[in-house]
Amino acid sequence: MTDPIESRVFDIIAKSAGVEREKITAETTFKDLGIGSLDAIEVIFDIEEAFDIHLPEQDANLDADTASGLVAAVRQAMASGTPATT
């Protein structure tokens, strides 16, 4: 069964990175896709906007974070009711 949150996050990453959706797996990192730090921030903004959430600032290395880690962060923000700030 397809996870709708994971699917949507992966679609956003693919669109932002300009890569085929099939290239993104749970273990894919931004670095694997050639997404630099500034572009990674843009991907995060796109995800926040799509889900109407705010992902907390992280000290983590965006290049090393996996797609599944980003999906988990989205789930956590949704569960905690962390709305986007305007």
Image: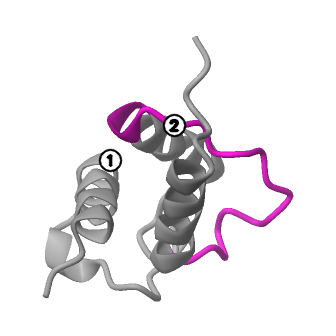
Give the residues in magenta: 49-66
Please tell me the numbered disc located at residue 16. Answer: 1
Which residue is found at the position 62% from the left and 38% from the top? 82
Compared to residue 29, the image places residue 19 above or below, namely above
Residue type (three-letter) at the residue carrying disc 1: Ser
Which residue is found at the position 43% from the left and 32% from the top? 52
74 displayed left or right of 60:
left
Mark 1 or mark 2, which is nearer the start of the sequence? 1
Residue type (three-letter) at the residue carrying disc 2: Ile
- The foreground one among 81 and 86 is 81
58 displayed left or right of 23:
right
Which residue is found at the position 73% from the left and 45% from the top? 56
Q: Mark 2 points at which residue?
A: 53
Please tell me the numbered disc located at residue 47. Answer: none
Number of disc labels: 2
Residue 35 location in percent, x, y?
49, 58
Residue 73 location in percent, x, y?
59, 62
